[in-house]
Image (spheres, rainbow, N blue to C red):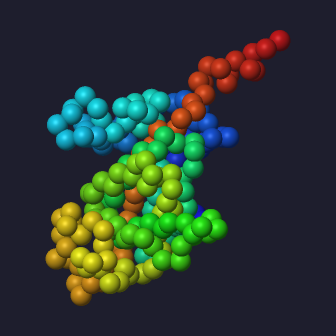
Amino acid sequence: MLTHRRLQTWPGDLTKDTLLGSPLPNWLVDPVIPRILALSKEEGNHDDNIFTGSPHRAPNHVLVNEYLPGQGIMPHKDGPAYHPVVCTVSLGASLCLDVYGSNEDGTRESNPRWRIFQEPRSLLITTDDLYTEYLHGIADLGADMDLREGTIANWPLLRSPDLILHGKNERQTRTSLTYRDVIKVSKLGSKIGIFDRR
């Protein structure tokens, strides 16, 4: 699923769906997390942001993924280790994220239900059923094709649709920052403590 792509996990990998507690580096915090926490779940309600209901009330884990032209990731669900809110910041170039439903027998649908065009410096927030019930992936393509109002779910929200020429986006290098709240966090002190027993 991640073959031949560059990936970093901050502050570290999960072990048995648990994160070893450690702060995120400042370059992943400012200015992104304050801006995410300023987003209200409901318009006009500034006391209730998108992470208000999460265990730590803020992201505590970030994946940094690099996608070169022709690279993608198989359709998947992120799983129960995370609170069902995912914030993905796109940097560099644009590409399409495909969102799939499941058939009655549990297999993945053959065609995406939605295609989301992720532009540079855009933020995609996935929550609730879209997080728990649907799969998301990026096709291994050198170019995204057939991009238009009827095929792209977020077309009215695009900042620069005029850069899509003849419905085609030639892919270039894209980096994504995926912010999530890992539910289970192990404190560093308790982990070190197991080695102090006599």
Camera-side residue: 87 or 154? 154
Task: Give me the residue at 27% from left, 84% from top.
Answer: 167
Could you say where residue 44 lies in the image, as x and y percent from the top left?
Answer: 17, 37
Could you say where residue 198 lies in the image, as x and y percent from the top left?
Answer: 83, 12
| 126 on left or right of 83 | left
**Quarter of the rendering containing residue 26:** top left
Could you say where residue 158 lies in the image, as x and y percent from the top left?
Answer: 21, 66
Could you say where residue 120 lies in the image, as x and y percent from the top left?
Answer: 28, 62
**Quarter of the rendering containing residue 80:** top right
Camera-side residue: 175 or 115? 115
Camera-side residue: 75 or 108? 108
Q: Is residue 93 visible?
A: no
Q: Is residue 180 above or below residue 110?
A: above
Task: Give me the residue at 30% from left, 54% from top.
Answer: 123
Task: Give me the residue at 48% from left, 77% from top.
Answer: 111
Q: Residue at the bottom extreme? A: 166
